[in-house]
Amino acid sequence: MPAFPHSTTATAVAVPPSLALPVIEAAFPRQLHPYWPRLQEKTRAWLLEKRLMPADKVAEYADGLCYTDLMAGYYVGAPDEVMQAIADFSAWFFVWDDRHDRDIVHRRPLAWSRLRSRLHTALDSPRDHLHHEDPLVAGFADSVLRLYSFLPGTWNARFARHFHAVIEAYDREFRNRTGGLVPTVEDYLELRRLTFAHWIWTDLLEPSAGCQLPDEVRKHPAFRQAALLSQEFAAWYNDLCSLPKEIAGDEVHNLGISLIIHQGMSLETAVTEMRRRIEECIADFLVAERDALRFADELADGSVQGKELSAAVRSCIANMRNWFSSVYWFHHESGRYRVDSWEDRSTPPYVNNEAAGEK
């Protein structure tokens, strides 16, 4: 079935039975930011302008990868300029993930180390890196600088702190993969929260709602639990869908692979266990969502400030819910996961497979 009446894909999407989640299709109706058609066009142009993908690959693959669809289905209600900045940052993130993967596959530790250092520096002083020689660094600086323009410096500092941790997690993944180390299930789950950038996507709920949330709200158990579960679902469902691609590429970073190696499961049993965890995560979110909405109601104490804060929290919770359907349909619409159609199952056709990092 199509994700919504006017699907972003030309044809209805068939979800393989092994990946189908009826509860998502029934109980999590998909939303789409009305800016989406313009978003797709402008992000495509931004990828070209910043030289983040070759022109031929942008023309052939950018729309089909559905990166803008994913974000437009999550940050519903965001002002258009916020939505655009988030979409461009997300597209950059996918390109960075591909560069990281290619640096691992082609054994380019020096290139990765140099990029890692440059990203740390650009995160703290993006304006100084807008014209960096590496397009990935310049594109990162541009997207971060735009994100920094929406909320106060305290939000920017938190975002930077969270993304520094993401960069370091990518470095640990680099060392694990080049060393052939499969993390234990618990170690993997902890690291995955960082490589999937759980708290980055959660931070971005705030400029979408037009409000920096105070610590006592962000750290409230009900709010934090709902946020965490929405991200856990996304990371684990991504692992389930990308398992064939990552096995083909001799990956070591996937929940299924950790279950197989460290808990002695067969591939079939590991897939069953991944589905169980994912379905439990959905059920737990529905409970956490009710608690978080009750908390939002309590914030509306009759004052103007309370009313505005309650509305912002409700907006964030609604988009946590939207993340489930957006992630689910993205994995079946995006060309990023159509491994069986690739000429080489270990080399995505949309990546620049040259040693870009060594230039």
Image (cartoon, helix red, strand yellow):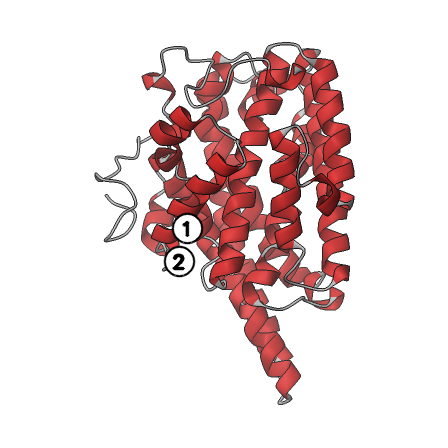
Q: Earlier in the sequence, mark 2 or mark 1?
A: 2
Amino acid type of the residue that numbered disc 2 sits on in the rendered structure: His
Q: Which labelled disc corresponds to residue 33?
A: 2
Q: Residue at x 74, y 39 (%)?
A: 122
Residue 233 is situated, as x and y percent measured from the top left of the image, at: 52, 43
Determine whether, in the image, residue 340 is placed left or right of residue 52: left
Tell me the element at label 1: helix
The count of marks equals 2
Q: Is residue 20 visible?
A: yes
Q: Residue at x 72, y 14 (%)?
A: 109
Q: Are marks 2 and 1 in contact (CB under 8 Å)?
A: yes
The vertical placement of 318 against 238, above or below, is below
Quadrant containing the N terminus in the rendered view: top left
The vertical placement of 317 against 144, above or below, is below
Residue 311, picture quadrant: bottom right
Q: Residue at x 67, y 38 (%)?
A: 194
